[in-house]
Amino acid sequence: MRVMNFLKYAPSDFADYYALVSNIEVMQQITERALPEHEATSEYESMLNYNLGNNCGYYRISGEDGVGMAYAKLIPDESDPSRAEMGYMILPEYWGKGHGTSIAARLIIQAQAAGIAVLYAVIDPSNAASRQILLRQNFVSTWVGDYEGLPGEILELNLQVKR
């Protein structure tokens, strides 16, 4: 099993975050555009503020060598904290090596520990890799359509134990 460190983003991690969101290959199936530095800086400040006051949040993922390779998020819905959104971004040089599957599995465990009942992910329906990762984790597609002006699909996983 590969070692992956999940630590909440800190102010010193901006370069790792920016390497992801400024990469058009990474962002193509998320926002369909790379983020300019001023926009990334604003998003990053919001993430840091969220991380300060919450158990869940935004995570920098690194390997054994400490090098940043990915981003993950686990964010409970404000209107219904029993539901949470998970997401991840991985640098292209780490694609196809099982990291997405490992990240998804770790987020599921964290969601269970946080008492989340329903975990969901929003993906671009054409992102076959993410779709396959989620389906292998027993997520089911619950909606496909226009999501904030972009193609979207929501996949959900019920984490409640059936008795």
Image (cartoon, grey):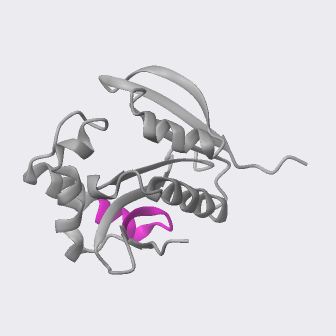
Residue 150 location (% of width, % of height): 31, 25
Vertical comparison of 10 with 129: above or below: below
The residue positioned farthest toward the front in the image shown: 97
Residue 42 location (% of width, % of height): 17, 55
38 sits to left or right of 155: left
Please report the residue visible at 31 percent of the width from the left and 35 percent of the height from the top.
Answer: 29
124 sits to left or right of 93: right
Tell me the quadrant of the picture where the N terminus can be found: bottom right
Vertical comparison of 149 with 41: above or below: above
Vertical comparison of 145 with 7: above or below: above
The residue positioned farthest toward the top in the image shown: 145
**Magenta segment, which residues?**
47-60
Vertical comparison of 30 with 39: above or below: above
Please say whether residue 80 is one of the residues in the magenta stretch. Answer: no
9 sits to left or right of 32: right
Please report the residue visible at 31 percent of the width from the left and 60 percent of the height from the top.
Answer: 47
Please report the residue visible at 17 percent of the width from the left and 53 percent of the height from the top.
Answer: 40
Count of numbered badges drawn on the protein? 0
Please report the residue visible at 33 percent of the width from the left and 81 percent of the height from the top.
Answer: 65
Residue 110 location (% of width, % of height): 58, 63
**Front residue of this view, candidates 139 and 38:** 139
**Front residue of this view, candidates 55 and 128:** 128
Residue 124 location (% of width, % of height): 38, 31
Please say whether residue 51 is one of the residues in the magenta stretch. Answer: yes
Give the image quarter of residue 139. top right
